[in-house]
Image: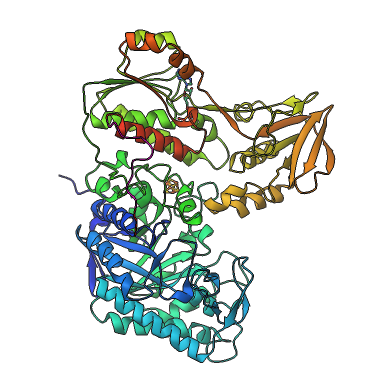
């Protein structure tokens, strides 16, 4: 048999005293669970190890209470009482022959220590990073000694917990070591400030001390942002970033390199492609003899192989691809590449950390549910009966529901009224920067095409009578939603007066129906769509004014790390942005805006109006079926369930989750939504 071109990905790599079984490396990533939901966190990591990742790391782990990221939920090693939580995670990871890594961190002025109430510390005095009304104090020599001591103690605890790899962390400019390194934050005049050598001193000391503690019991990794993507004034791969790598070249056992800040590192697909960090980090391997790991939203095995063969990386780092598909390595190994659930780069996963709730993922509905619901990304309970299912609607909810039911062994029919499956994504994936989102559909359509127990019928708009005539055991209505065009949303509780203006729904714009004159987009949704429509129209030569009651464009996208990029994109295009205003009425080509603070009115002009405010569930079919309850029973239908956007318009992640949830629990009499374990610790 021919050698697989991907065999190189399964070669072992020596990392200091440890050897990883392959090149698949789950780099540290936050998950909103951390010390608050430790069992959930440990089970999630276990599944990654089971899926074949050679190394599985924690998220940030605070080494001391003066780096208290409350109200976030990260890991902690403040004292010995935290060790058992870590030991559980280590045991889980090692039980599948993977190495367990821990990312030790002190976040300096990036933590306001809201729980511990310890004054934050920084190389030089400055305001705390977030808007809390407090300042970080400049560290004196004793503080620096203390910090080194805390790091040593945390490293010792990490060894006790059994970790194989211990991180010294100066990736992302949130970290205290990065603050020492950067002249933006470090204006000291002693031996820890001034020259680059001085600014690197603390990193070097901590690396040496961590190596001493680790001895031969663990490897020491250095995670370092070689570039901040800000040119002059920041660490950059052509200047200081490179100099630091040269200075410390062979000191760590492993270089984990990236670009800062987190939004650049976890860049969404709207703003960057797979492997976008390569040009920043590719010098590192030429400077050090130690192995190098880096990330790039790698989901293509060919890209991975190319990274190794071209000498860019030794280990394929992944956070998001391992979230979307914890079994990615196994699928490559078993030549099941077509089955990889590729990350779409939407960053719904980062919203868990940003909002301090357990992680969720658009592509992988089991993410974050491994412990509390006992869900596994690949395994699912066999069918509990011979029942069959009719799913009406082939959008994200309907397709995920069909796939999960089919995996269970049920016979499934999907009826879709359009000539393609995909629902809302058929349109949305055509928006500029959203092409990768199609993967939600492509993955499910492919997987369903491999199942003998599923039939998908296109061009099949079903009515209530059709459904009753077919007589399936269960009917799932996944008919989606549509955008309102009456201005009702968060600000306007009732339809607004709209006259003498060309009114467009978001769907019409995505279908290519373009306004002929200046348009006003009213964003009371605050996620991505309104800004994407504004870009689309502007780029097609339509003059756009963007009005929002929020104080910024697309405010919810702060949780997906994109807000600043989206607003910059609109500003760079010269799109007029009016914040803190709702639209009270549109008449005779005049838009009556209302200031959200004062209620004062302002008038602007435009010929077209696109409200992006809220959606209406397409639940008419369901309601009709429910009216004919007796008839339903007579036709042998045991249940009719509304799922996805037709139940509650929300994110694609929520629709996929709901489709999956239904399929898991359809033959379980317990409540669909509330059936989960809690960590009452
Ligand atoms: P969700 O995100 O909940 O999956 P979508 O709006 O993306 O919702 O998808 C809903 C799908 O349902 C669309 O593809 C739509 O064409 C389809 N649909 C709506 N009504 C019917 C119907 N009566 N019969 C068949 N398909 C329908
Ligand atoms: Fe990828 Fe989106 Fe899942 Fe995050 S939520 S792992 S970006 S698919």
Side of 205 where 241 appears, left or right: right
Q: Residue furthest left?
A: 1
Main secondary structure along the magenta-highlighted residues = loop
Q: Is residue 482 above or below residue 54?
A: above
Residue 217 percent location from the top left of the image: 23, 77
Residue 260 percent location from the top left of the image: 52, 65
Residue 636 percent location from the top left of the image: 30, 12
Range shown magenta: 668-678
Quadrant of the image for the C terminus? Answer: bottom left
Q: Is residue 302 above or below residue 92?
A: above
Instruction: Tell me where residue 234 sits by quadrant.
Output: bottom right
Q: Is residue 144 above or below residue 435?
A: below
Magenta stretch containing residue 274, yes or no? no
Side of 242 where 50 appears, left or right: left
Residue in the image at 43% along x and 20% along y: 416
Q: Is residue 371 visible?
A: yes
Q: Is residue 461 visible?
A: no
Residue 97 percent location from the top left of the image: 19, 60
Side of 83 where 149 appears, left or right: right
Q: Nearer the viewer, residue 122 or 254?
A: 122
Q: Is residue 259 above or below residue 425?
A: below
Q: Residue furthest front?
A: 680
Instruction: Tell me where residue 465 sits by quadrant.
Output: top left
Magenta stretch containing residue 673, yes or no? yes
Quadrant of the image for the N terminus? Answer: top left
Tell me, what colour scheme is on the image? Answer: rainbow
Residue in the image at 45% along x and 89% along y: 145
Q: Nearer the viewer, residue 486 or 510?
A: 486
The count of marks equals: 0
């Amino acid at each position: 048999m021919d050698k697989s071109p991907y065999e190189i990905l399964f070669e072992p790599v020596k990392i200091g005293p440890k050897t990883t079984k392959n090149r698949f490396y789950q780099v540290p990533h936050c998950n909103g669970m951390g010390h608050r939901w430790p069992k959930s966190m440990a089970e999630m990591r276990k599944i990654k190890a089971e899926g074949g990742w050679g190394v599985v790391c924690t998220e940030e782990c605070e080494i001391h209470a003066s780096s208290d990221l409350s109200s976030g939920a990260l890991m902690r090693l403040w004292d010995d009482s935290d060790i058992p939580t870590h030991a559980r995670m280590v045991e889980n990871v090692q039980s599948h022959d993977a190495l367990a890594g821990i990312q030790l961190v002190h976040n300096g002025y990036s933590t306001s220590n809201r729980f511990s109430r310890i004054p934050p510390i920084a190389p030089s005095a400055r305001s705390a990073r977030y808007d809390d009304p407090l300042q970080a104090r400049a560290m004196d020599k004793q503080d620096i000694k203390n910090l080194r001591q805390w790091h040593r103690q945390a490293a010792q605890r990490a060894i006790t917990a059994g970790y194989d790899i211990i991180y010294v962390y100066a990736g992302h400019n949130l970290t205290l070591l990065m603050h020492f390194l950067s002249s933006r934050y470090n204006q000291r005049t002693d031996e820890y400030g001034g020259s680059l050598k001085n600014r690197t001193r603390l990193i070097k000391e901590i690396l040496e001390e961590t190596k001493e503690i680790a001895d031969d019991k663990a490897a020491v990794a250095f995670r370092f942002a070689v570039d901040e993507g800000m040119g002059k004034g920041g660490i950059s791969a052509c200047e200081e970033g490179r100099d630091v790598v040269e200075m410390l070249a062979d000191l760590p056992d492993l270089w984990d390199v990236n670009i800062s800040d987190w939004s650049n590192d976890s860049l969404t697909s709207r703003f960057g492609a797979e492997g976008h960090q390569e040009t920043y980090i590719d010098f590192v391997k030429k400077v050090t003899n130690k192995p190098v790991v880096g990330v790039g939203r790698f989901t293509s095995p060919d890209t991975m192989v190319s990274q190794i063969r071209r000498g860019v990386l030794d280990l394929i780092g992944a956070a998001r691809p391992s979230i979307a598909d914890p079994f990615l390595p196994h699928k490559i190994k078993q030549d099941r590449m077509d089955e990889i659930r590729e990350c779409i780069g939407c960053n719904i996963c980062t919203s868990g950390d940003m909002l301090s709730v357990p992680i969720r993922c658009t592509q992988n509905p089991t993410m974050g549910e491994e412990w509390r619901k006992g869900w596994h990304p690949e395994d699912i309970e066999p069918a509990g009966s011979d029942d069959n299912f009719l799913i009406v609607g082939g959008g994200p909810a309907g397709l995920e529901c069909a796939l999960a039911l089919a995996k269970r062994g049920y016979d499934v029919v999907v009826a879709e009224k359009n000539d393609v499956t995909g629902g809302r994504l058929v349109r949305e994936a055509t928006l500029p920067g959203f092409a990768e989102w199609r993967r939600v559909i492509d993955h499910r359509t492919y997987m369903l095409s491999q199942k003998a127990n599923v039939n998908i019928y296109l061009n099949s708009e079903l009515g209530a009578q059709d459904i009753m005539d077919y007589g399936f055991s269960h009917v799932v209505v996944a008919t989606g939603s549509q955008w309102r065009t009456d201005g009702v949303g968060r600000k306007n509780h009732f339809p607004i007066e709209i006259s003498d203006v060309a009114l467009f729904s978001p769907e019409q714009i995505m279908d290519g129906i373009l306004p002929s004159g200046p348009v006003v987009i009213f964003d009371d949704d605050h996620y991505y769509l309104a800004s994407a429509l504004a870009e689309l129209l502007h780029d097609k030569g339509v003059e756009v004014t963007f009005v929002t009651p929020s104080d910024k464009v697309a405010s919810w996208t702060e949780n997906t790390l994109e807000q600043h990029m989206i607003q910059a994109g609109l500003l760079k295009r010269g799109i007029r942005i009016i914040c803190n205003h709702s639209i009270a009425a549109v008449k005779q080509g005049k838009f009556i805006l209302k200031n959200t603070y004062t209620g004062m009115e302002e008038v602007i002009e435009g010929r077209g109006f696109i409200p992006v405010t809220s959606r209406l569930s397409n639940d008419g079919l369901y309601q009709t079926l429910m009216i004919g309850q007796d008839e339903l029973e007579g036709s042998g239908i045991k249940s009719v369930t509304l799922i996805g956007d037709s139940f509650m318009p929300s994110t694609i992640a929520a629709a996929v989750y709901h489709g999956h949830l239904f399929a898991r629990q359809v033959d379980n009499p317990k409540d669909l939504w509330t059936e989960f374990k809690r960590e009452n610790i």
